Image: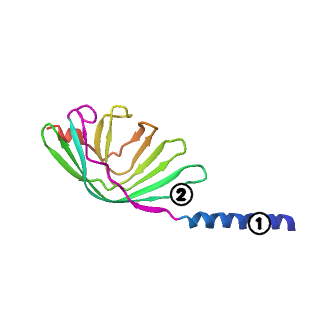
Amino acid sequence: MRRVLGSLCLSIVVMAATTVSALAARPERAFAEAPPTTDYEAGEICAFPVRIETPVNKGYSLTFAVAADGTQRMIVTGRLGTKVTNLDTNEWLTANVSGPGVFTFAADGTTSIKGGGPWLLYLTPTDVGGPGMWLTFGRLQVEVGETSVTAIVLPRNSRDVCEMLAA
């Protein structure tokens, strides 16, 4: 009985020490770089050429230590504003797309994204569900393979940006 109790106590001490060392590794907070202003040709995202800009970026990321299974998690929060322009008509719209979002990077090179709040999601022809661009509000889930989006769940409250700018 003493051996079992001793083994149990030793197991608890080892688990507690492991938990304390895991808790000691604080996430790294950093300024989240916005994507550069990018022009897309007609057909890459919308039927017309578009420009996507990020005039407001006050976003930050919290990156956590790599877990035992090789995954790493990053939370992105803060204020992010975007501007999308139809380059044929010069019609544009601006939107708050602050999220937030949780990115989980797997050891195999895939990424899982879970978002809430407002997002701007755009897909190219090589992505599942693409091409297209949506302004989303609510829960969003995206799975990204090594080179493209492989699965997507848009919230019910999503607006088609290409349609909005097609006038």
Q: Position of residue 27 (x, y in %)?
A: 49, 62
Q: Is residue 87 left or right of residue 137?
A: left
Secondary structure under the numbered disc 1 in the rendered image: helix
The residue shown at (52%, 46%) is: 106
Q: Is residue 38 left or right of residue 104?
A: left
Magenta stretch: give its range: 26-48
The residue shown at (29%, 43%) is: 134
Q: Which residue is mark 1?
A: 10
Quarter assignment of residue 153: top left
Q: Quadrant of the N terminus?
A: bottom right
Q: Which residue is mark 2?
A: 65
Secondary structure under the numbered disc 2 in the rendered image: loop
Quarter assignment of residue 147: top left
Tag shown at residue 120: none
Foreground disc of the pair 2, 1:
2
Viewer-closest of 41 and 94: 41
Magenta stretch: includes residue 50: no
